[in-house]
Image (cartoon, rainbow, N blue to C red):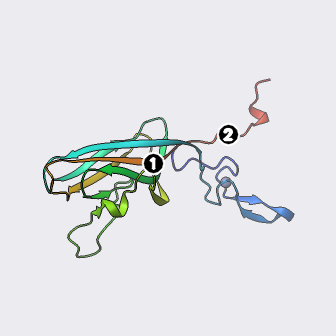
Amino acid sequence: MREQTPCPECDGMRWAEGPGGVLQPCPGCDGTGQDRGVESFFVYVFDVTLALAATRLDNQRVVMDGDAAFRLKALGGTQTGDYRIRLRDGSGHYLSTGGAGSTNDLVRNGALIGTAQFPFPIIPHVIYAPSGHILIDLENQSGAPANIVQIAFIGAKVTPTPAPLDNDKLVR
Ligand SMILES: [Zn+2]
């Protein structure tokens, strides 16, 4: 699903006729005009071993499947030691910063990466296009020779909502 796919209920017009003919934001898309799509649960997994103390690894990537967009809703993971992390959205923009003048924009895993039992919620959700990718910067903080990290990007594959039946298009 592309983010620009029009809402099938209002055909991207954003408004719908409510009671008494009053116009109201389309309930199918909350007035955005964009298709929210159909979701199915999915997890993309990222595995890495940070081999040396204070290893910095930039621009690691998880590539999305080509069959659907991905709506990232939560982060979970396991690790054998502490690390810092920074993620980018589907446009390549960073999802964290330390602010002007800071020297490190990476977030400690304990502040951003949850667990299977308590995944960290991503609100609002972040959408990645089909065949897009999540870029990841990592910095080992464990001091151990090998920090074995797995991150679960938890969310949903999103495919376009099927178009409503249109009598004019039925084969007779
Ligand atoms: Zn709509």
User: Mark 1 — residue?
Assistant: 154
Q: Give the quadrant of residue 104.
A: bottom left
| In this rendering, position of residue 85 left or right of residue 64 | left
Identify which residue is drawn at 80% across, 23% down.
172
User: Mark 2 — residue?
Assistant: 163
Three-letter amino acid code of the residue under disc 1:
Ile
- In this picture, is 35 found above or below 109? above
| In this rendering, position of residue 104 left or right of residue 67 | left
**Upstream in sequence: badge 2 or badge 1:** 1
For marks 2 and 1, give the one nearer the viewer: 1
Three-letter amino acid code of the residue under disc 2:
Ala
Q: Does residue 96 show up?
A: yes
Furthest-bottom residue in this view: 101
Position of residue 43 measured from the top left corner of the image (x, y, whole percent): 44, 43
| In this rendering, position of residue 25 left or right of residue 97 | right
Position of residue 63 measured from the top left corner of the image (x, y, whole percent): 36, 41
- In this picture, is 62 found above or below 58? above
Identify which residue is drawn at 45% across, 56% down.
118
SS class of the residue under badge 2?
loop
**In this view of the protein, which residue sits in the foreground, 137 or 154?**
154
Furthest-right residue in this view: 20
Furthest-top residue in this view: 172
